[in-house]
């Protein structure tokens, strides 16, 4: 393989790796919710009780089936900002 071809091949691989790099992509709502619920140590049922919603609502949010209303989102922020224990 000539040096020019190797350089072009390296650029292609580098470009592909850059396109596949999601470290700078915004995190999904689902990902944020799962991370913050895990950080608080709450199970879905307990988070639902803190927010004042059904267990099914939390399950749907975490499965990206639905998104919370603005009012529910404020409750989630409050619920995930307090640690258990």
Image (cartoon, grey):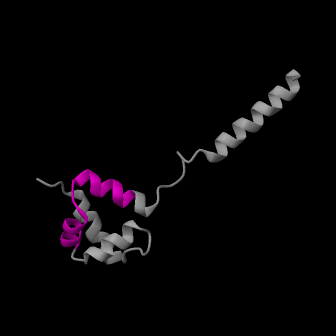
Q: What is the quadrant of residue 70 in the picture? A: bottom left
Residue pictured at 23% horizontal, 54% vertical: 40
Residue pictured at 21% horizontal, 54% vertical: 41
Q: Is residue 10 above or below residue 56?
A: above
Spot occupied by residue 38 in the image (x, y as percentages of width and height): 28, 53
Give the residue furthest to the left. 85
Q: Any magenta on residue 63?
A: no
49 left or right, relative to 19: left
Spot occupied by residue 36 in the image (x, y as percentages of width and height): 31, 55
Tell me where the magenta segment starts and ends, as one range.
32-51
Spot occupied by residue 43 in the image (x, y as percentages of width and height): 22, 61
Spot occupied by residue 79 in the image (x, y as percentages of width and height): 22, 64
67 left or right, relative to 58: right
Q: Is residue 3 above or below residue 18?
A: above
Residue pictured at 24% horizontal, 64% vertical: 78
Overall secondary structure of the magenta stretch? helix
Q: What is the quadrant of residue 65 in the picture? A: bottom left
Which quadrant would the N terminus be assigned to in this image? top right
Q: Any magenta on residue 47?
A: yes
Residue pictured at 21% horizontal, 59% vertical: 42
Q: What is the quadrant of residue 71 in the picture? A: bottom left
Q: How many marks?
A: 0
64 left or right, relative to 82: right
Q: Is residue 82 above or below residue 69?
A: above
């Amino acid at each position: 393989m000539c040096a020019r071809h190797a350089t072009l091949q390296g650029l292609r691989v580098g470009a592909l790796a850059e396109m596949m790099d999601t470290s700078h992509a915004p995190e999904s709502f689902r990902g944020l919710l799962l991370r913050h619920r895990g950080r608080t140590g709450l199970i879905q049922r307990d988070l639902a009780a803190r927010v004042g919603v059904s267990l099914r609502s939390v399950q749907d949010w975490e499965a990206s089936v639905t998104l919370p209303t603005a009012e529910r989102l404020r409750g989630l922020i409050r619920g995930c900002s307090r640690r258990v224990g």
